[in-house]
Amino acid sequence: MLQQLQARNQQYQRAIDALVAARRVVNGWDPKPEPELVWTVRREVLVAMGDQEALEQFDREHAQDITAEQAARHAATQQVLEAPARVKALEQYITDLAGEMARDVDEGFIHKEMARLFKPSAQRMLTAARAFVQAWREMQTVEASLKGAFRLNHYSIRGDRLSGYDMSLIGTPHKGDLLPNLIEGLAYDDLYELNRQFKELDDALARQIFQRLDEAGITPGMLHVYHPGVAHDHRKIYAPDPNPPSKRPQEIPFAAATVVTVNT
């Protein structure tokens, strides 16, 4: 399915390029081709002179040149005459191609295949997460029990409540981190590195996955699904010209002339 969509993406782009070129001819944005008339003009002069012998010799020597010039003239004329019909035909082809894309791409099936390939990794994560939750609960329970057993309240002889030593063994995790950077008995560098890995992808695993996908004929990248739209939408097919003609700035009527004074 994806390989078919990739091929249709290429066909769509080629058709859009051809549509842009045809529209440029219709709009008169490209200079009309000027075919060579060197041999044609010379033959017409000989015909006008009425020299049959010279004309026959000319035809023998330059028959291929005359044929080539006539073919070039015909091609140049046909390009201009056929441009409107070519635009219409290309628009219909692009519409039909878009209909094929929208009809044949089954995103529900693609999602099911993604879920099937993803499931083993998710299952390993769940198994590891259960072990992590159990260890996390154990660590928090031990901290809470120890803090409750060694609770010391400080007061002055005047009855004022005083601050005591912070008995916390577990710090507060930063936003996006898996663990706090402070857990008594564990090195700060180890916790920092663990949090960094938690927020990043596994580059080595990503390369392996892309290699497997490439071996299966699935090239990573953005594919487009074009839709033909509704029948009553009469807007033109979107085909931006990469090199549109430059527009002259609009003249402002009755604008005051700029006066430049040169002091000598």
Image (cartoon, helix red, strand yellow):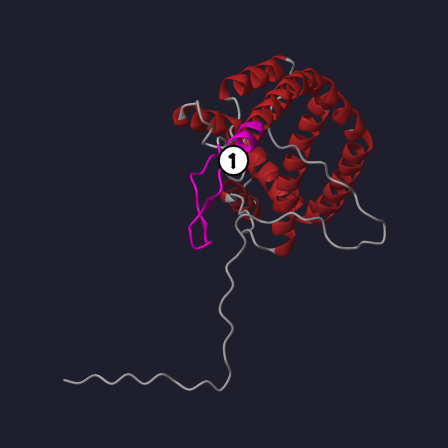
Looking at the image, residue 31 lies above or below residue 11? below
Q: Nearer the viewer, residue 16 or 65?
A: 16
Q: Is residue 110 magenta?
A: no
Q: Amino acid at mark 1?
A: Arg
x and y, in percent, of residue 60 in the image: 54, 29
- The quadrant of the rendering that contains the C terminus is bottom left
Circle 1 residue: 151
Q: Which residues are magenta?
A: 145-168
* Within-10-Å neighbours for mark 1: few <14, some 14–19, many 20+: few
Quarter-of-image position of residue 117: top right
Q: Is residue 156 magenta?
A: yes
Looking at the image, residue 202 lies above or below residue 18? above
Q: Nearer the viewer, residue 11 or 125?
A: 125
Q: Is residue 112 left or right of residue 69?
A: right
**Residue lying farthest to the left in this orientation:** 264
**Residue lying farthest to the front in this orientation:** 157
Residue 249 is at least partly visible in this image: yes
Q: Nearer the viewer, residue 134 or 80?
A: 134
